[in-house]
Each structure stands twice: as C-alpha cells, then as structure tokens.
Amino acid sequence: MVELTQIEFLNGIFAIFIVITFYFIGLNLISKYFRLKEKKILYLGIAIPFMGNMWLAISITYLSILLTGNTITPMVYFLIGYGFPLGIVFWLILITELMYKDKQKVIISIYAIYWVIMEIIFFIFLFSDTSLLGVFSRPLTPVLGPFLAIRSLIILVILFFSGILFYRESHKSDNPEIKLKGTLFIIGLILFITGAILFVITGIAFLPLIFFIPSVFLVYGAFILPEWMKKIFLKETK
C-alpha cells in the first residue's frame, strides 16, 4: 500500500488539472480546424496534448494509488510519459509550415532520423532496465536518468529557438496583429519552458501549473487571436 504525502497528493491533483487544460486547448484547436480547414491549427492542436504526456503519467499513477493503493509499474509509467514524444514532431511540422516551407522536408527528415534513434534507445532501456530511464525515489515522479534528461533538454531547446525565430519573423511585419501573435507565442513558450524546468528541479506540480496554464492560452492566442485578446493587447484604431 503506497501512501502519499500532502505535497504528493497536491501534485496529483495539479497534474490532472494540467492534463485537462492541455487536452481542452488541443481539442478546441482541432475542432476549429474542421471549421477553418487550416492545417497549422491542426498541427498545434495535436502537439499540445502530447506535450502533457509527462503529467498524464503522473495523473494515472496518482489515480492508481487512490483507487488500488498501488502505483503503476515503472515500465508503464515511462511508456506513457516518455515513450511517444510526438508533440515535438508536430511542433516542427507547424514551425516549418510557418517559416521554412522550402526546407520542411529536410528539417523533418533530419529530426525523424534523430527521433527513430532516440526511440530505439528508449525501448532498449525500457525492456532491459527501466532504472536507466529513471529511478523512483517518490511515488509520482522519478529522478530522470541522463538519457531522458538530455532528450528532454533538447526538446526544450528546440521549443525555445523555434519561438525566437517565429518572434523575429513576425516582428518584421508592419501588421500589429502579426507582431502581437509573435509576442504571445514567445511569451507562451518561455512560460512553458520555465514551468518544465521548475518541475524538474522541485518535483512540485503547483509551480509549473502557474506557468503552464497561461502559456497554453498565449500560444493558442498566437494562432487564433480571439477578439478579447485584441481588445486587451491592441489599441483600437478608427
């Protein structure tokens, strides 16, 4: 029988809230794709829920402890949380659609090769010795091994630099709405990266929650830019 500390109990609740938020935004974007037929919205709508896989694993573990008194196995945990990092794949497709359409095939092909190599290593570790991926010193969150730590860092670096590039390109425009989209995009990404780093350092889900919730809404706004955001961030001109 696994017992949760007060902080771990709160971690589980906040992890569930993070997952619900990511899926809500993602499914909302996907539904808009069917109305607008805009592939960029679809790619973002698929990417966002996959970005929450780490917290999905925490949420399922938390619910398992509450319902059965036992955690899920490390193999299942790592498979859910880290086995299918497809969010960054769709993110790169999105970014190359926005800025580097002529180089899209080359960029995606290079990343696909890297991704396949990383997946092969991941599943070798998963089926041979899960401690190579991470060790559970607490029930909900493992201490990541070098492989997953480095892979996660690479994803964060890709997110950061793609945000910088998008911001730079958007601010070349004279259109204030396009500039606003670039600003919302980079702020949203910085908040997401900050939250992810804080979670890795502290293992407390409440701290990243403060950053994640506004981050996904800002990235959402960067692509949809609803009227209420225009009214807040742009001065209306007659």
Image: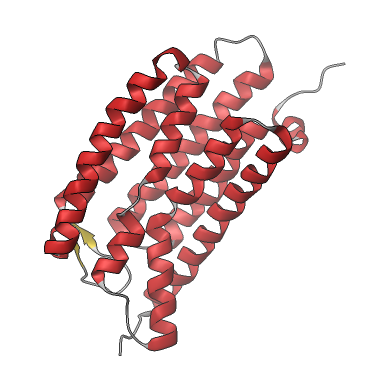
- Please state if 117 lies on the left or on the right of 40 as rendered: left
Q: Would residue 225 be seen by someone viewing this image from the given angle?
A: no
The residue drawn where x is 44% and y is 86% is 67
Asked whether the viewer can see residue 170, the reply is yes
Against 31, is 186 above or below?
A: above
Q: Residue furthest bottom?
A: 1
Instruction: Give me the residue at 28% from left, 26% from top.
Output: 110
Q: Pick the quarter of the image with the C terminus.
A: top right
Foreground of the two, 71 or 89: 89
For this orientation, the residue located farthest to the right is 238
At 30% from the left and 60% from the top, the residue drawn is: 79
Locate residue 233 relative to residue 48 in the image: left or right: right
Horizontal arrangement in the rendering, residue 85 relative to residue 23 (left or right): left
Front residue (pair 128, 193): 128
Q: Nearer the viewer, residue 227 or 106?
A: 106
Residue at 27%, 39% in the rendered image = 115
**Residue 164: quadrant of the picture:** top left
In which quadrant of the rendered image does the N terminus lie?
Answer: bottom left
User: Picture coordinates of residue 107 (x, y %)?
Assistant: 34, 23
The percent coordinates of residue 120 (x first, y second) are: 19, 47
Instruction: Please tell me whether residue 237 is drawn above or below residue 181 in the rendered image.
Output: above
| Residue 216 quadrant | top right
Tell me residue 144's x, y (percent).
21, 57
Residue 61 lies, with reference to residue 111, above or below; the image says: below
Residue 60 x, y percent position in the rendering: 42, 71
For residue 141, above or below residue 88: below
The structure's colour scheme is secondary structure
